[in-house]
Amino acid sequence: DLMIQAYSDKIREYPADAVEQALDTLADNHWFPTWAEIKAELDYLTRQRRGIIRELDRKIAKHKPTSSVAGLIQGALKE
C-alpha cells in the first residue's frame, strides 16, 4: 500500500493521458514496473509538452516586469 501511495503521489505530476499510455506500455513488459521505468517513460512521452511550457514561461517572464498594457504591447511588437 505504501508503494502504491508513493507511486500515486509522483504520477500526479504528469498529464493523465501520458500516465495511462506509459502504464499501458510498461504493463506489456513488466508485472510491476519500477518508479525509474515509469518516470523514464513519462519523461519521454511528455518531453515535447515540457518544451512548449518552458518556451511559454520564458516569453511570459520576458513581459512580467512590465506592468502596463502599453508596455506589454510594445514588448510583443519587438518580437
Image (cartoon, grey):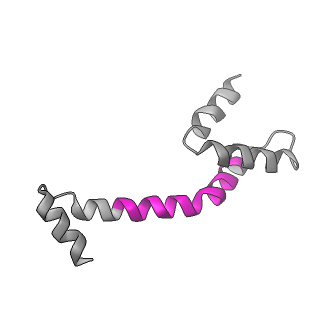
Quadrant of the rendered image containing residue 15: top right
Q: In the displayed structure, does residue 38 sit left or right of residue 53? A: right
Q: Which residue lies furthest to the top in this view?
A: 1
Residue nearer the viewer, 11 or 62: 62
Residue 63: say if magenta: no
33 in relation to 9, above or below: below
The answer to whether any part of residue 72 appears in the image is yes
Residue nearer the viewer, 7 or 21: 21
Residue 75 in percent (x, y) is at: 20, 70
Residue 24 in percent (x, y) is at: 80, 46
The range drawn in magenta is: 38-57
Quadrant of the rendered image containing residue 72: bottom left
Q: In which quarter of the image is the N terminus?
A: top right
Residue visible at 72% across and 50% down in the picture: 37
Residue visible at 59% across and 38% down in the picture: 10
Residue visible at 84% across and 44% down in the picture: 27
Q: In the displayed structure, does residue 62 sit left or right of residue 54? A: left
Residue nearer the viewer, 37 or 53: 53
Q: In which quarter of the image is the C terminus?
A: bottom left
The answer to whether any part of residue 66 appears in the image is no
Residue 43: say if magenta: yes
Residue visible at 65% across and 57% down in the picture: 45
Q: Main secondary structure of the magenta part?
A: helix
Residue 69 in percent (x, y) is at: 14, 58
Quadrant of the rendered image containing residue 46: bottom right
Q: In the displayed structure, does residue 10 sit left or right of residue 66? A: right
Q: In the displayed structure, does residue 68 sit left or right of residue 49? A: left
Residue 50 in percent (x, y) is at: 51, 59
48 in relation to 28, above or below: below
For the image, the number of numbered tags is: 0
